[in-house]
Amino acid sequence: MAFVADVFESIVDAVVDVVETVVDSVTYLVSGNYEGDNGDNTFTAVGLGLWGGGVNVYGGNDTVYAASLKLDVYDTWGNLSVHGAAGFMNINKSAWGNMTVSGLAGATNLQHTGRTGNINFKGAAASNYLYRQGYSGNISFTGAGISNRVISKVRYGNISFTGAGASNVVERIGGDQGDIHFTGIGAYNKVTNSASRGSIYFTGGIGAYNKVERRGYSGNISFTGAGISNRVISKVRYGNISFTGAGASNVVERIG
């Protein structure tokens, strides 16, 4: 009898979970709001409106599946995964943990300001904007867009960019240690690294204009690419430049 009771209880719990999930999804469809908790939340966000306060999943390891005209997700600690499509996708993480996002959007805005944790993005949008600030964490970008901009201001962290766009801007700003690995195609490619220590590895850049600049204490630049205009500048105290490229105008400067 105990076994039968346990099975029955499990079935009831499963039914309750399904009902709660359906209610949450319908509530989001109508109101544009979802309130999670500090547990591990899994939520499907389907919405056609531009209203509402978005998806608040708070702490825990959370997963959001989306098909929404406008998607706003707010998360604190724990790992966050968002998959799907949206007209506009805005993801904001304010405490430790990784952010993983994959999908399609008209515009993507990903911001992680927690102390530790990575941003991992795979997708495509007309405009992609990734911003990481905190103590440590890497950014991995694999995607395409008319405009792609990736910024990291952590103390320790690397950027890996593999993508294509009319404009690709990758910036590693300040901090103690960080490398940039850039593999991409774009009419305008700008890659800058001002961490105290770290290198730039630039491959591709097939387009009209490529600018690669390294500032800080130490680090190398390795450039392999082609463009109508290529400009490679190093202003570190210790570091080398390796240039393999083709262009109507090539400028390579070592200052410092």
Image (cartoon, rainbow, N blue to C red):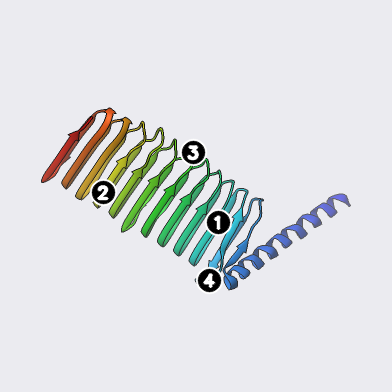
Which residue appears farthest toward the front when viewing the image?
256
- Given contact means CB atoms under 8 Å apart, are the residues at marks 3 and 4 in contact? no
> Which residue is at a point 32% across and 57% down the rendered structure image?
147
Mark positioned earlier in the residue sequence (3 or 4): 4
Q: Secondary structure at mark 1?
A: strand
Q: Which label sits on residue 74?
A: 1
Between tags 3 and 4, which lies in front? 3
Vertical placement of 194 versus 205: above or below? above
Which residue matches tag 2?
189
> Which residue is at a point 72% across and 58% down the rendered structure image?
14
Mark positioned earlier in the residue sequence (1 or 2): 1
Q: Secondary structure at mark 4?
A: loop
Q: Which label sits on residue 135?
A: 3
Vertical placement of 167 versus 133: above or below? below
Q: Secondary structure at mark 3?
A: loop
Near mark 3 (Cα within 10 A), the count class, few <14, some 14-19 or many ≥20, is some
Question: What type is the residue that disc 3 sits on?
Answer: Tyr
Q: Secondary structure at mark 2?
A: strand
Q: How many marks?
A: 4
How far apart, in angstroms, are the residues tagged by discs 1 and 2?
31 Å
Q: Which label sits on residue 51?
A: 4
Nearest to the observer: residue 180 or residue 41: 180
Q: Which label sits on residue 203?
A: none
